[in-house]
Image (tube, rainbow, N blue to C red):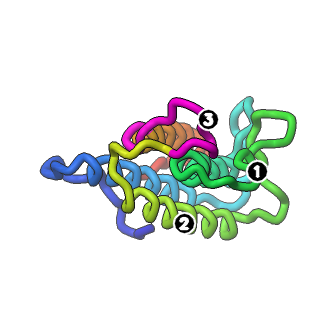
Amino acid sequence: MTSEPLGEPPTTVRDPHAIVEGQLDHYRDALLRKLDPLPETDRVRSRVPSGWTPLGLLKHLTAVERRWLEWGFLGVQVDDPWGDQQPGTEGWFVADDESYAVLRERFEERVARSREITAAASLDDVAALGGRFEADPPNLAWILLHLVQEYARHVGHLDIAVEIAHGDVGE
């Protein structure tokens, strides 16, 4: 990711694939720009009744990319696709040895893999059966738009946690 804020794609971009990829990259970048300046104590601290933490959010979005693109779109069998969740609950889980540096690196690696997957496909390509989907799989356009809305929602949640932590949500 870049140190300069990565804005939305310009309104002059006409290729739908480039538009949706650009929007997704915009939110990926925003996630890290909001997490990077937080002190570690604020990354692991929950400020909401559900108990999620900014670090848990990073791990969750890493898993979301894997679930939707590797396991979902490609149909690859993956170990523990729900590994971001606390066993027996729907809550996010971060292990004691999963620091911000470790999870940030995993996120960047996952994003790079996601970009490889989507660059090699058309928006009209339909997800493979046998991974996440057993019937009626969506096409890549649907999956990418789902990812954009997932990031938009969670980066908005992160804005609240960051604002409570130190008052400035940044860009």
Question: Vertical placement of 52 versus 28: above or below?
Answer: above
**Closer mark to the observer between disc 3 and disc 1:** 3
Q: Residue at x 38, y 53 (%)?
A: 26
Residue 86 horizontal/vertical position (percent): 82, 42
In the image, taking residue 33 as reference, residue 6 lies left or right, namely left
- Local secondary structure at mark 2: helix
Numbered range of the magenta stretch: 128-142
Q: Is residue 140 magenta?
A: yes
**Closer mark to the observer between disc 1 and disc 2:** 1
Q: Which residue is mark 2?
A: 108
State the separation of the CA atoms marked 1 and 2.
19 Å
Q: Is residue 59 magenta?
A: no
Q: What secondary structure characterizes most of the magenta part? A: loop
The amino acid sitting under disc 1 is: Asp
Q: Residue at x 38, y 46 (%)?
A: 125
Residue 140 horizontal/vertical position (percent): 41, 44
In the image, taking residue 47 as reference, residue 28 lies left or right, namely left
Residue 44 horizontal/vertical position (percent): 73, 53
The amino acid sitting under disc 3 is: Glu
Q: Which numbered dot is residue 80?
A: 1
Question: Vertical placement of 3 versus 139: above or below?
Answer: below
State the separation of the CA atoms marked 3 and 1.
17 Å
Q: Which numbered dot is residue 134?
A: 3
In the image, taking residue 65 as reference, residue 44 lies left or right, namely right
For the residue carrying disc 2, how many other residues have a C-alpha within 10 Å: few (<14), some (14-19), or many (20+)? some
In the image, taking residue 8 as reference, residue 81 lies left or right, namely right
For the residue carrying disc 3, how many other residues have a C-alpha within 10 Å: few (<14), some (14-19), or many (20+)? few
